Structure formats: C-alpha cells, structure tokens
Image (cartoon, grey):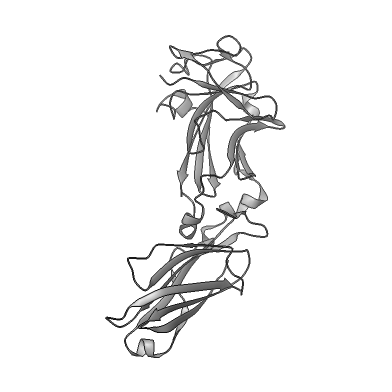
Amino acid sequence: MRPLLRATTAGTAAATAVLVLASGCTVLGGSGDDLAAGEVVRATTDAPAPGSDAAARGWTVDLQLPDGRLTARIAPLPDAGTAATDDVTPDDGTTLVAVSWATEAGTGVPAPVQTSVLDPRVPDELALVAGDRRIPLEVDGLSRTEGFVYVALAEPGDWAFEVVFDGVAQSVTEGATAPHVDAAAQPLYAPAASEATDYTSCLSAVTPASFTRTGGSAFCRARTASWPWVAGQGWSAGGPWHVVQLETTLQPAAGTAVVGAEVSATLDGAAPVATSDDDRSGSPGATSSTLVFAPGGTRFEVRRTSTVGGDPVTLTGSLPLTR
C-alpha cells in the first residue's frame, strides 16, 4: 500500500509535507493516531471510491481556470466508518473532511486559445480558507490535475475551497450561486460570444496580379477569442488578451514551387506580444500561427510574402475584429 503523506500548517504558513509511515493502513504521528485540526493527509487512492461517503456527501464546486475546468468535492464525514480504507480519524472536537478534485484540461477554453495556455510551470495552489485562516492542500506527489486528501477542521461549515492560479485567486463556499473571483479572472466566465469557433476569411489581395491570372490562388482566414491569461504573458491588465489563429495559403499553378513564408500581422497597427507557429511542412504554401495581442484593437491586418517560381508574391489581408 502507498504510504500516507501528511502536511501540517500553522496559520497562513505554507504546508510542509512529511512522510508518514503506514503500517496496515494506520496513520502514525500527530496526536496519537489522530489527525489534529489543520492537518492534511493524502488518501491512498487518487479519487474517492464510487458510493463512498467521500464521493456521495458534501458539495461540489466547478471553477474555470485558464487551461481547463477544475471540479472539487468537499465532504464532511460522519464520525465513524467513513475512511476505513485509510483508517484516518480526527482529534476530538474536529471533523474529518474529504477533499477531492480533478481538472479537465481544455474544458471551457476557447478553441483559438487552446495552444496558448499550455505551461506546466505555472505556480498554483489549492487551499481551504476561512477568514484569515488558510490550510494549503499541499502534499508531496499531488498536483492540480487530480488529488484526494483528508483534512481535520474545527469548524467545517465555515470553509471555502480556493484555487490560486499564477497569483490570482478564485474561491467558492457551500451554497454559493457563483464563485468569488479576483477581477483579473472574471473574463474566464464571460459569455461564449467572446469566441469565434469558425474561421472568417480575410479581405485579401495578391501582388503581382499575374499570380492569380495564371491559375494561382491565395487566401487568409482567422478565428479569434478573448482570454485573460496566456502562457508566457500571464494575466492581462485592462481587459483580456486577444488571441488570433491565422492561416494563409499561396497555391500557384501546378508545377511551381513556393519557397519560404514571411508572415507579419498587426492589430490596430500593434505587433503581437507572442507568436506560435504551427508545423505545416506537409502542406507547401500554407502557414498557420497563433498570435496574442494586447487588450484593445479591432482591425486585424496580415502580410505574407513568399517566393514563387523565383519571384516574390505578397498576400495582404484585413479583418475587422469585435469583442
């Protein structure tokens, strides 16, 4: 059996995880074999068993994060028979609370933003909070992706479940109709109208005009979304980032090669703060990139130049963007 891990906290201090040896699933240390108020111990499974008190009791919370949706269950347990698998009991005067969570990567994240929110280095923290009292749910080996712990609380009804993502907090209390969200994270809950799921063709032109007269074709298209956090840039100020997925194509007449592609784009004349190019090596003449622009701006413009048959060919396009 995997050994139990215990984390202890004092006030708002960070939890220090220590290995707790397990013998026949019995938790050692603390006050006798009991979990003292404020202590956290990792369960021996990654999630509560279906039908168990930890899975069926308590309340559930959903929080939208920049890279997916986190669902957590906070379940105060009855005095006996609730954690038989782990044999965890609280000190007298405290209540044992099972806290489990899982994050669905990409859920609730607009399609144009999906590749811009991938960053495993983002600092985050899960905690139970009541006023100035805070118990981080930090135990070695757990992550925001999935976890299951037991917490001993003196007043279980007063606590909120909190997630801090890259310094910005969201929290939910039992019975709340909506989470308490820091201002920077509020756009995570904006209507889906901020996302364009379909691509829109640019108003475009090609020079020289002989490229199309001789059977060549060209187009650019884009889809956009507003999102308050992207990897490498963090949380935006003054409104959400504007993320644009851009595709361009120069398709000359048969037998003519397209060499290279220099693509530049602006939003109201400003260059993107971040650019990520997709691998389109298997599609000669095609480019695909994701661009992140500072908040604001409504006119998107693109310019793409390639060499076709030894001569430069330039595609220009524009697209009005709305928020």
At 63% across and 56% down in the image, what residue appears?
236
Q: Out of 148 and 313, give the one closest to the viewer.
A: 313
Q: Is residue 235 above or below residue 28?
A: below
Asked where in the image residue 308 lies, by quadrant, the reply is bottom left
Is residue 79 shown to the viewer in this render?
yes
At 65% across and 29% down in the image, what residue appears?
158
Numbered-mark total: 0
**Residue farthest left in this picture:** 255
Is residue 174 shown to the viewer in this render?
no
Q: Name the spot of residue 243 as percent of width and height, x first.
A: 53, 62
**Residue farthest front in this picture:** 310
Q: Name the spot of residue 34 as percent of width and height, x first.
A: 57, 13
Q: Is residue 40 above or below residue 87?
A: below
Q: Is residue 201 above or below residue 157?
A: below
Q: Out of 259 and 294, give the one closest to the viewer.
A: 259
Quarter the C terminus occupies: bottom right
Q: Is residue 302 above or below residue 82?
A: below
